[in-house]
Image (cartoon, rainbow, N blue to C red):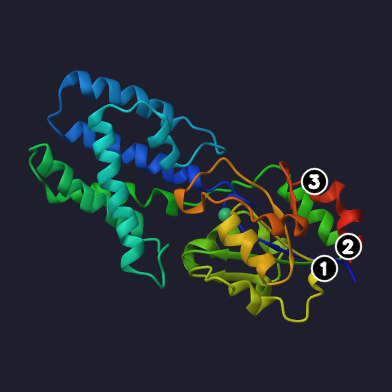
Amino acid sequence: MAPEFFFDMDDTLIYNQYMYTKAYAEFIDFMLKKINAKPSAKEHSNEILQIIKHTSPKCQGIEEIIKTHDLDNLLHDMFTIVNNFNIEGGRDNPENPYNRERVPKAFRKAYFDICKKYDSPILETDADEAYEIGKVFHNVNKDVVEGAEDVLEFLKEKKCKTSIFTCGDVWLQQKKIEINGFDKYFDKNRQIIVPIKHNGEIKNYINGCDPNQTFMVGNSIKADIAPAVESGIRAIYFPSATYYSWDDVEMKKDHGSKVLTIIDLREIISNYDLLASLK
Ligand SMILES: [Mg+2]
């Protein structure tokens, strides 16, 4: 029997997080035009925004940018306000924390708070515009991670069973699957979209698999790698530049023997014989 693979999607098969970073940059840019900040503060903020806006798909997540850039107080303040609303939106909806309304609503709420804080007039039409900026990442473009298609093509030739195992907003994740052309590699019943990867969720999908020949491929230790190993299967860890404080955990020492860490997805091809021989 050929080995079986479960793939996380966001920032494993497609570049994803940088779209949020860009949306944040767009929003802050919009707010800078609205508030009565000192010209010097605006100028400095604009410089940093230009850097963030031109980040590549492999850029850092928004949290890391906030941590590592020398932001002036104004920008820092805005990021903090919008980020808090974003996190709060997830907490308010624990069964569907990544719903697609979360960011647009966070931008809308942040618009009101930032205007109040900086003593700027509030307009409903501007609040609507802030909401629309948060919807930019709903316009999905093809953005496949380097090497992913080679790997999927290869596994198809080897007749391996492959599944997408992703969490997020069902409508949005479905759209990403279609637009990135993954229907070609994953049968409909092997496109698993869950609103949240509860601990142990993967267990529901690995019944009947040979645990030594089943691999979860993902970029998150907490959401992908640890749950897979704890469920008895193996994992392939593909860390991305994306950073979430939520996921800032070390791999457990005793998980190491069950995990292959790679820096390029195509290492799945070069390691295939080894993976297929594991007992
Ligand atoms: Mg991911």
Q: Residues within 10 Å of mark 1 (few under 14, many from 20)?
A: some
In the visual, does 200 lie left or right of 99? right
Q: Residue at x 30, y 40 (%)?
A: 79
Q: Is residue 114 left or right of residue 161?
A: left
Query: Where, by quadrant of the figure, is residue 209 drawn?
Result: bottom right
Question: What kind of residue is marked 2?
Answer: Leu
Q: Position of residue 145 (x, y in %)?
A: 65, 45
Question: CA gap, disc 3 to disc 2?
Answer: 16 Å
Label 2 CA crowd tier, 10 Å (few <14, some 14–19, many 20+): few
- Residue of label 2: 278
Q: Secondary structure at mark 3?
A: helix
Q: Earlier in the sequence, mark 2 or mark 1?
A: 1
Furthest toward the front, the residue is 253
Residue linked to disc 3: 267
Residue 189 image position (x, y, % from top left): 67, 76
- Please, what is the three-letter code of the amino acid marked with disc 1? Asn
Disc 3 or 1, which lies upstream in sequence? 1
